[in-house]
Structures are given as structure tokens and as C-alpha cells.
Image (spheres, grey):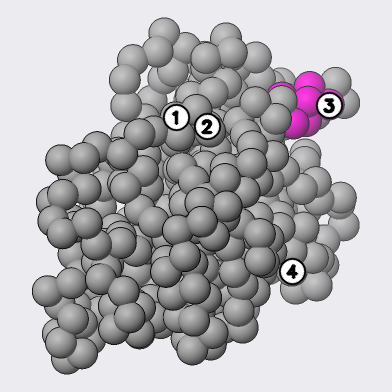
Amino acid sequence: MNIGIVCYPTFGGSGVLATELGKALADKGHGIHFITYQQPVRLTGFSANLYFHEVRVPTYPLFDFPPYETALASTMVDVVRNNHVDLLHVHYAIPHASAAYMAKQILAEEGIHIPFITTLHGTDITLVGKDKTYAPVVTFSINQSDAITAVSHNLREETLSNFSITKDISVIHNFVDTHRFAKRPIDAFKRVIAPNEEKIVLHASNFRKVKRIADVIHIFNKIQQEIPSKLLLVGDGPERPAAEELCRSLGIFENTRFVGKQQDMEDIYAIADLFLLPSEYESFGLSALEAMAAGTPVIATNTGGIPEVVTHGSNGFLSEIGDVESMSIQAISLLSNPALLEQFSTAAKEQALKFDIVNIVPQYEKLYAEVLAK
Ligand code: GMT
């Protein structure tokens, strides 16, 4: 099959998932055409089956807001016309689903039928999508999709309760390449972060409000009072300056390390003892799954799709949103008990296997075949 994948090219979960899906499909012999405004961050290395088509958005003095959606739809039309693309798979509804609908209508005028699948990832539904500024277009374009998928049962329910959806939504969970993430720790790297063999507590995100970074820091503050430990913070975003300031005001800046956006996440998860994800909401929590694949147990909130990934008391612990006290107690109980930490680490790896790339990617291929057979 030749598939056009539309996604955000950034470090966010939807872009990462879409890129990993495209790479896995290319490895299986499909022709994959990424269509987005810059090379996706995880699209590294060469594959004969992978193509990247940049969406260029010409500026003009009249445009206070350059019309990306129009440029995207036009690029989709061009890529489909010239590359025998069989279907479009758009990740994150806004504005990708409505651009795909527009491209589909334009191509229909030329006698080309191009179905499109929309994968809902989370904030496109739970935060941005249900804002009334966007909701009518989001609802319409989701309903016009030839198939819809959500990354968790929770996100499926959220979508059905917030929008008038007239079609079925299939659940296809996030996935991870467990082989790639089961790496041995690089000792030299570990010593840079924890020179005196301190425990390494990790958080990785886009530092948005929904991630509750202040909770990460307050949890770590309590941990480091009991256990020699370091906090490694990966990623960047609007909440980072406030997070750094909070570390300074709590007097723990020396024990924290903000390393910004990183490519080789498998090396980072490999050196971590514990992963913190105290989010307000996660449709799934791809970062938690990647941590688990590396054998790192997760302390998270009992929200959204996280309970579909993290099992309380087995491979991690789940608490109510904002319950910093419980999350710190659970973290300390794990970090202070090597046998328990090892048990949770083994269970985390086993749980990640359920979401292995080899189990999930065929679900997308099956859906593609069904859509094309219609
Ligand atoms: O906020 C993020 O984590 C980024 C966001 C995105 O759309 O790029 O991630 C969402 O999609 C991921 C992949 O499907 C999910 O694993 C994340 O849980 C989800 N984030 C939220 O729901 C907040």
C-alpha cells in the first residue's frame, strides 16, 4: 500500500507515534509519504520506502495568520496525484482531518477516490477540539473520515460524550518497539547524571500545564529528602521556566537536571529508576509506555487512558490528580526497596509487551485493508 501520513513533526506524542508507525509500515514494504511542515523529529535514517513532503506556507503581507490548512490540503492533493497514494492517515484531528476532507473533495472532482482515516490522540479532543471555536469543524471532519481511531478506550468515550459522532471509533492503543527500548544503561551517561550512584527519577514531556510539572518537582522534593536521588527532566515547553524557578526556590536545583528535547530516549529511559507522570489528563501516556518497555516503573495519576497502560500495585502506582503526598510515598517505597523495584521493573517490561509494535501495527494494516475494500 502507499499511505500518506499527516502529523505534527514535533516531539509530542501524536507526532512520535505517527512517525514510528510510518517507519514500521515502511519496514514492512509499504510506501510511506509523510506530509507535514518539517521533517518529523523521529524520522531519522534512510529507508527506500519513506518519503517526506514538506508543506510550504507562503507568506503575504495580508496574512496575519498564514493559512496552513489550505497549504496542507493542497500538498495532500499534490502528493496523492503524483505518488499513487491509496489512503491518507491523519494524526491529531486539528487541522489535519478538515484538510484531508478538503483534499478528498478536490480529488473527487478529478475522479480520484482517496479515503482518509483520522486518529484521535488526546488534546485534539479533550482540550482544543471541544473549544467552541473549533468544535463544529472538528465534529464534521471526524464524521467525514472513512474510519476513526482513538488511542485508548477512555479517549473513545471522551470523544463520544463531547461530540455528536455518527460513526464507530476503533481503539488502537499506542505502541512501543520493546526491543529498541530494552537497552542496557550507558554507565558513563549514568555517572554524569548521578555521580554518586543516586537513584534517577525521570520525567519527560512537552512541559504543558496538563502535565502538572510542579507536582513532578514537589514529589521529587519529598523523595530526595529520604533517598539520595536526582531528577532528570527531558523536554521543553511553556512551563519550563516556572519549573526551574520552583526547583531553585525549594533549594533542590543542584539535584535536578533539565536536559531539553532529546532524540535518543531509549538511552535516557535505560538509566532511570522511576518515571513520574502526574498529568491532569493523558489519553494514553506514550512516555509511560516507553519507560515501562525499558523496565522503569511509573508513578502516575489515575486519569484518562493511563490505567489502560499502568497497573496499580504491579508495574507502577496510580493516585488521584494532585495527590503529591501519595505519589511521593509510593515512589519512596519503591526506591527504598531494591527487591520490590526489581519486581515492578520486570512487571513493567511484561506489560509493555502487550503494546509491542508487532501486536499493534497489524491492527492499523487491517483497518487500512478494510477501508480500501469498501
Ligand atoms: O501532550 C502530549 O503529550 C502531546 C500529545 C500529542 O498529541 O502530541 O500527546 C497525546 O498523544 C499521545 C500519543 O497518542 C498520547 O500518548 C498522550 O497521552 C496524549 N497526551 C494527552 O492526552 C495530554
* Residue at image point 66% right, 66% down: 313
**SS under mark 1:** helix
Which segment is the magenta one? Answer: 363-370
Quarter of the image with the N terminus is: top right
Left or right of residue 299, residue 205 in this image: left
Out of 67 and 363, give the one closest to the viewer.
363
Which picture quadrant has residue 306? bottom right
In the structure shown, which secondary structural element does the residue marked by tag 2 occupy? loop
Q: CA distance from mark 1 to mark 2?
A: 5 Å
Q: Say what amino acid the circle numbered 3 marks.
A: Glu
> Which-is-in-front pick, marks 2 and 3?
2
Q: Which residue is mark 4?
A: 158
Choose the circle earlier in sequence order: 2 or 4: 4
- Give how far across and how far down residue 285 sits, in percent: 55, 58
Q: Is residue 256 left or right of residue 277?
A: left
Residue 172 position in % (x across, y down): 72, 43
Q: Which residue is mark 2?
A: 177
Does the beta carbon at disc 3 come under 8 Å from ligand 1?
no
Q: Which residue is mark 3?
A: 370
In the image, residue 12 sits, relative to residue 132, either above or below, namely above
* Residue 1 to residue 174: above or below: above
Above-or-below relation of 146 to 201: above
Q: Is residue 190 left or right of residue 95?
A: left
Three-letter residue code for mark 2: Asp
Residue occupied by mark 1:
180
Q: Decide which of tag 2 and tag 3 comes sooner along the chain.
A: 2
Q: Quadrant of residue 227?
A: bottom left
Front: mark 2 or 4:
2
Label 1 amino acid?
A: Arg
Residue 200: image x %, image y %?
Answer: 30, 60
Q: Tags 1 and 2 in contact by the CB under 8 Å rule?
A: yes
